Image: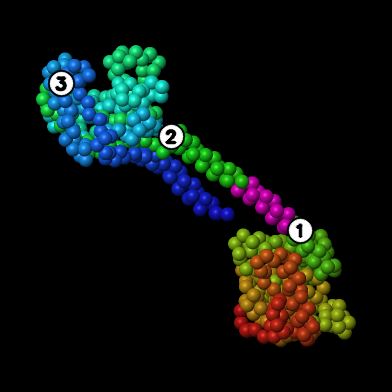
Amino acid sequence: MPTRGLLAALLAALFVLSALAMALSDQILDHVLVVPPVPQEQLVLFGDETEGGTSEARLISAEQRHAQCLLRPTFAYPFCGFEVKLTPEPLKGLDLRSYHTLRLGLRYTGPSKTIRVLVLNAIAGYSKLGERESLKFNEIEFGVDQLRNHMVDIPLNALSVPPWWIKRRHVPPANSQTEFDNVVQIGINSGTVDPLGTHDFYIDKIEIIGQRISKETYYQAILGLWLVVGGLLMARWFWQMRQEVSRRKQREQELEAMNAILDRHSQALDQQRKTDPLTGLANRHGLEASLQRAFEEWEQHQEPVSLVIIDIDHFKRLNDTHGHLAGDAVLRGLSDVVRQHIREPQDFLARWGGEEFVVVCHGCKAPQAVALAEKIRKLIEESVFEGELRATASFGVAEIQPGQTLSTLFAAADAALYRAKGEGRNRVVFAGAGAGANTVPATV
């Protein structure tokens, strides 16, 4: 699982991306439909002949979509223009309900000050083939000065149905709003009050700009993403809680196992006290606390921990030969030798029971622990204790490994100690090493 810092960075990045996605929603969602040049038969020219006028529209160039209007005074409101069919089928057009802008690349020369743009929509059961006025007229008129570099963006919601068409077609008020569900033609028309004369129109580009999905769906997707992230964070939190509970149970089980091992090796000690009265060292209770602290440092920070178990060789024979007072003197003298040469407070020395001692080496890897044990072994061998007594000791050394518990660490060191005894005593054996493991540098 990611650390808290990484998780915070990911959430910050997601927040920034969400803010950008909302701020740039139009650019992200916009979809452009380009109307390509069409064959000449898909160009519609019209004038005011149906109204008794003589104005005329001419197609100068189908390829350039260039038409020319000649407005003549025979009709009170002369007009003419041309339109582009969007599909080959006259009454089957494009559904532009998800589009919002009509972009025209338009050039105009002539005396007019206004231009009309028409968007004609075929209505099922109403529009008739060959009858242009049966198409629903959606139009807008704007000034020629609105063309910027021969370009104009027209919001579709700015178009309206002209009153003359509503009146002539007897359209009820409920159906007088604009419709874009079946657009068949887009056209250019002369203005409402255009000067007579010649008007040239060039349509360089027709683009219809819409959205891939609605903004509502887009924002719902962003919200859904955050709901998923929130759910994952909640799941992660529950998972961590379960892991913590599991770790606590595991530690409790390890403590129980460690207590069982300590009980087996410390039957001679007072179970209620933390200090051994003979040597002044910590007893099993103090040892347990040090071990638990070392194990937590290993688990949380991967600080190495090594364990050294020391057993005085032939201690029973020494007691039987020289008496228990002599044995006590050796125990005190040996504990002083060890205590003087460990790294306090990093190393923790305790009397385990009888003739056995334990050194917990915090932050110490196996090579250093083995070297320390070898140094102490030689010092004990060379020491003369009270009453001119001499003694030797055997050492078992183990370093905690990934996946290992306190009980398995103890078992490894204990097994190394018994190997040292079995191989002749007065030697250091590292857990898992070969028979020559006691041959190590004498310096720490």
Residue 238 lies within the magenta run? yes
Give the secondary structure at mark 2.
loop
Residue 378 horizontal side relative to residue 317, left or right: left
Nearer the camera: disc 1 or disc 2: 2
- Decide: few, some or many residues near mark 1? Use Cα within 10 Å; few <14, some 14-19, many ≥20: some
Q: Position of residue 40 (x, y in %)?
A: 24, 37
Say which residue label 1 marks.
253
Say which residue label 3 marks.
54
For badge 1, the amino acid type reads Gln
- At horizontal 39% and vertical 39% (from top left) the residue drawn is 29
Viewer can see residue 293: yes
Q: Earlier in the sequence, mark 2 or mark 3?
A: 3
- At horizontal 62% and vertical 76% (from top left) the residue drawn is 368
- At horizontal 75% and vertical 66% (from top left) the residue drawn is 407
For badge 3, the amino acid type reads Thr
Q: Quadrant of the C terminus?
A: bottom right
Q: For marks 2 and 3, give the CA distance.
A: 47 Å
Magenta-highlighted stretch: main secondary structure? Answer: helix
- At horizontal 85% and vertical 68% (from top left) the residue drawn is 268
Q: State the extent of the magenta-drawn residues as a range.
A: 236-251
Say which residue label 2 marks.
214
Height in image: 176 above or below 373? above
Q: Nearer the viewer, residue 102 or 41?
A: 41
